[in-house]
Amino acid sequence: MRAEGYRIVPTYDDADLVVVNTCGFIDAAVEESLETIGEALAENGRVIVTGCLGAKEQVIRNAHPQVLAVTGPDSLQQVMDAVHSHLPPHHDPYSDLVPPGGIKLTPRHYAYIKIAEGCNQRCTFCIIPSMRGDLMSRPAGDVLKEAEKLVGAGVRELLIVAQDTAAYGVDLKYRTGFWQGRPVKTRVTELARQLGSLGAWVRLHYVYPYPHVDELVELMAEGVILPYLDVPLQHASPSILKAMRRPGNIENTLQRIEQWRATCPDLTLRSTFIVGFPGETDEDFEQLLAFIEEARLDRVGAFAYSPVAGAAANALPNPVSEELKEERLERFMELQTAISADKLQDKVGRTLTVLVDEVGEDEAYGRGSADAPEIDGTVIIEKSAGLEAGQLVRVTITAAGEHDLFGELAGG
Ligand code: SF4
């Protein structure tokens, strides 16, 4: 839009048109998307809807018949067509120039790169494959060119995302692509190695626990990519994992975690879990707690199971009551919060490399290799005079809270 002379503004009042990007992953996300569309209609009135929930146009139209257009996921051209018909562009050759890194909605020093769309797995609680289809990987050369451009424009951290990042290239049978005249296989380990050569931090998200994740951990140990493994495990009881259609051998998972830590001692492990899945007994839940206690993961997100229209899990017997779900979620989080806080304490006294995100009056806020933006903690740097966002600094940790670390510039 910027390339065509449109201006992106931060408030409804200043906008001639609002584009709402939606999520339809779980019912709570659908509700939030519909609320956001309602808010945009009330505050501005001229609204185009896009994103996952757009695949279910009727749901949107039933709730908000006055939206101008509804487009689905990955529909750049359709969104642009809708924008053109409701707000034709004024062409101005001077304002039409796009800066070299393109336009991002994230701060200048970090950027998300999507390497694939869709998923070949069929987890019973998830409707992503039905909304987004099977895995479709971008050619390795394309991804690397985009990454190179971003790093050239000042990006210091590349966040690699896809619904199933570690499966990257399976659909293309790991075809060989080209970048800078060199052959590069469309495979996550090779892509990660090449991305790591660009000189920015590389953080991989949503890594399904395939066997070749071990190779990614080796790259982390070598310092090629950040030692940060975001591996959603969802549960620890074999029968629940089976009902979820996820890898069920949890003993094996514990051994792998031990192995990963032996390979890469600095590894940060993040995972997500669902409690209260249909059929989850007290024993299943206790098994999950025992796993959490033993695995001592660094960062954990947990959700009470929420049925999604169209998901296979809805047909499973013995749903867990809302009350019990909430009670289990609370017990789970209490245990994990203590583990995470304990693990943060271990960092006190260490000196970490920190990427500065924001500089306030008295302190600056940054993140270390263990902290992804938005979802993890922050490193709060005291006596931060002279620092700038996007700078990499060494920080000695002096204290730890439940989620965040506090420190001072090393040698400062
Ligand atoms: S791997 Fe992730 S995206 Fe794919 S079906 Fe399972 S939960 Fe959904």
Image (cartoon, helix red, strand yellow):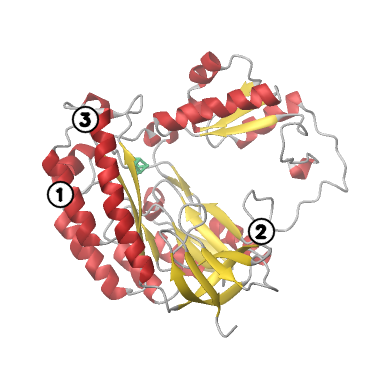
Q: Residue furthest left?
A: 283
For mark 3, does the 10 Å Cα neighbourhood hold few (<14), some (14 to 19), or many (20 or more) residues? some
Amino acid type of the residue that numbered disc 1 sits on in the rendered structure: Gln
Spatial separation of the CA atoms under disc 2 and disc 3 = 44 Å
Q: Position of residue 104 (x, y in %)?
A: 65, 50
Amino acid type of the residue that numbered disc 2 sits on in the rendered structure: Arg
Of 149 and 56, nearer the camera is: 56
Q: Is mark 2 within 8 Å of ligand 1?
A: no
The residue sitting at 40% across, 28% down in the picture is: 27
Q: Position of residue 67 (x, y in %)?
A: 63, 20
In the image, taking residue 154 as reference, residue 135 lies left or right, namely left
Q: Which residue is mark 1?
A: 287
Q: Is residue 181 visible?
A: no
Of 402 and 166, nearer the camera is: 402
Are the two marked residues, 3 and 1, in contact with CB atoms closer than 8 angstroms? no
The residue sitting at 57% across, 17% down in the picture is: 64
Q: Which residue is mark 3?
A: 320
Q: Position of residue 10 (x, y in %)?
A: 71, 41
In the image, taking residue 342 as reference, residue 292 lies left or right, namely left
- Mark 1 falls on what kind of element? helix
Compared with residue 359, is residue 102 higher up or lower down, i.e. above or below? above
Q: Indicate which disc, 3 or 1, sits on the residue closer to the N terminus.
A: 1
Nearer the camera: disc 2 or disc 1: 1
For mark 1, does the 10 Å Cα neighbourhood hold few (<14), some (14 to 19), or many (20 or more) residues? some
* Quadrant including the C terminus: bottom right
- Which disc is residue 108 wearing? 2
The residue sitting at 74% across, 41% down in the picture is: 8
* Quadrant including the N terminus: top right
Of 273 and 198, nearer the camera is: 273
Q: Indicate which disc, 2 or 1, sits on the residue closer to the N terminus.
A: 2
Nearer the camera: disc 2 or disc 3: 3
The residue sitting at 19% across, 37% down in the picture is: 243
